[in-house]
Amino acid sequence: MDTKKRILLVDDEQINLEFFDVMLTKLGFDIEKAENGQEALEKVKRWKPDLILLDNVMPKLSGWEVTRILKTSEEYRDFSEVPIIRFSAMDDVKDKVEGRELGADDYITKPFNFSEVLARIRVVLRTRELVGQIERREERIQVSEEIASRVLAYVDGLREPLRSLEREATVLAPECGDAKPFVDRARQECAQALAKLDGLDQAVLALRAEAENLRQRETALPALKKSLRG
């Protein structure tokens, strides 16, 4: 895993910000800090973090509000997939459930152990990378299907003029006299071209079927994202 990931630390307690800044920087992460929810939203736009460590109880906007805005606001739709680990001094099941339902990836109760926090950071980042790989694979499948559809349409566009030419050559051949060998050759070449187009059709359809089978074997992406978040 690339250790040069960007982590945004959001906490109104300076001692926590400094602690995580020092420890995570030593481990190779790029760190940015925010002391309240409003500042966090501004830095998300400007800095584009790979992960947010977010305290829950803060001035201006709480961690819950920041999570809701990032995951549901149209203004922040480009950042809705940024993973969030929330911190709270309260071990409240209702708060945890609401955070997960909003899209938070993990929840850690204070006081925390740094080794545990680091392990969870790495798990969340690996999970996000896995989801990203699946998304890119899905995009490639979609592009392949679009190319297949265009190729099939192009082949259909070529087939009818060739069939028409082949029919005309068949009709004209007996009346062409000395030109008959050339007409016969044109008819044969049309037939060969049509056979090649049929073969191309079959190859493209086989590739399309293979892409569809691959998609069906995969877990649906939305369900996978939900399961990976727990």
Image (cartoon, helix red, strand yellow):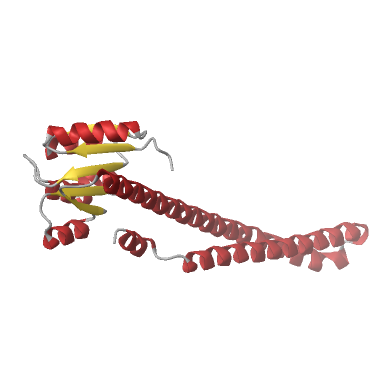
Furthest toward the right, the residue is 178
Image location (x, y in percent) of residue 154: 60, 56
Question: Which residue is painted at 15% across and 33% down in the image?
Answer: 15
Between residues 170 and 154, which one lies in front from this camera angle?
Answer: 154
Question: Which residue is painted at 52% across and 64% down in the image?
Answer: 214
Residue 47 seen in this snapshot? no
Question: Which residue is painted at 49% across and 68% down in the image?
Answer: 217
Furthest toward the left, the residue is 59
Image location (x, y in percent) of residue 152: 59, 60
Between residues 140 and 93, which one lies in front from this camera angle?
Answer: 93
Between residues 112 and 77, which one lies in front from this camera angle?
Answer: 112
Question: Which residue is painted at 33% across and 48% down in the image?
Answer: 119
Question: Is 156 located above or below residue 17 in the figure?
Answer: below
Identify the image quadrant of the N terminus: top left
- Image-based side of 152 in relation to 184, left or right: left
What number of labels is visible? Answer: 0
Identify the image quadrant of the C terminus: bottom left
Image location (x, y in percent) of residue 227: 33, 63
Residue 225 seen in this snapshot? yes
Image location (x, y in percent) of residue 44: 24, 37
Between residues 184 and 153, which one lies in front from this camera angle?
Answer: 153
